[in-house]
Image (cartoon, rainbow, N blue to C red):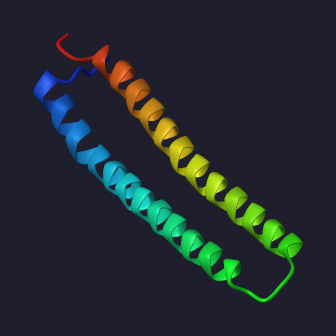
Amino acid sequence: MTEYVTKEAFEKFKVEDFAQVRQDLTVLTVKVDNLDDKLNTLSAEVAVLPTTSDVKVLIHEAFKEARGTAISLGVMIAVITGTIIAILSFVFSVYVGH
């Protein structure tokens, strides 16, 4: 027999089960921001190194790539998380109120 849930039970499920996902996403965002700050600090330190400008350019490009990858990763995780929540919400909404 099919078992249905009430709208209230479904809303409670969403709040409780996705609270950890939202918290993890916030932590990840903070970590990406911290990584960006550290890359900025390293870039500034590289600028004063006694080395050739070619080496400095290579290092700056590596930092730029790392920064872009970190930001892309954060965005990708946010999109995936949002998609999962939307899909689960849609699937569970079929059973709500029946």
Closer to the camera in the image, 26 or 18: 26
- Residue that lies at the very extreme toward the left in this rendered image: 8
With respect to residue 96, does 86 lie above or below?
below
| Residue at x-position 34% and y-position 25% | 89
Q: Is residue 18 above or below residue 53?
A: above
Relative to 73, residue 37 above or below: below
Number of numbered markers: 0
Q: Position of residue 61 (x, y in %)?
A: 76, 61
Residue 35, horizontal then vertical, whole percent: 53, 68
The residue positioned farthest toward the bottom in the image shown? 50
Say whether residue 51 is left or right of residue 22: right
Residue drawn at (26%, 22%) of the image: 3
Give above or below for 18 relative to 49. above
**Frontmost residue, 1 versus 35:** 35
* Location of residue 91 (image quadrant): top left
Quarter that holds the N terminus: top left
| Front residue of 20 and 57 | 57
Q: Is residue 93 left or right of residue 64?
A: left
Residue 98 lies in quadrant: top left
Q: Residue furthest top?
A: 98
The residue at 49%/36% (across/down) is: 79
> Which residue is located at x 60 percent, y 57 percent?
70
> Which of the 4 image quadrants contains residue 95?
top left
Residue 97 pos. (x, y %): 17, 13
Q: Position of residue 77 (x, y in %)?
A: 52, 45
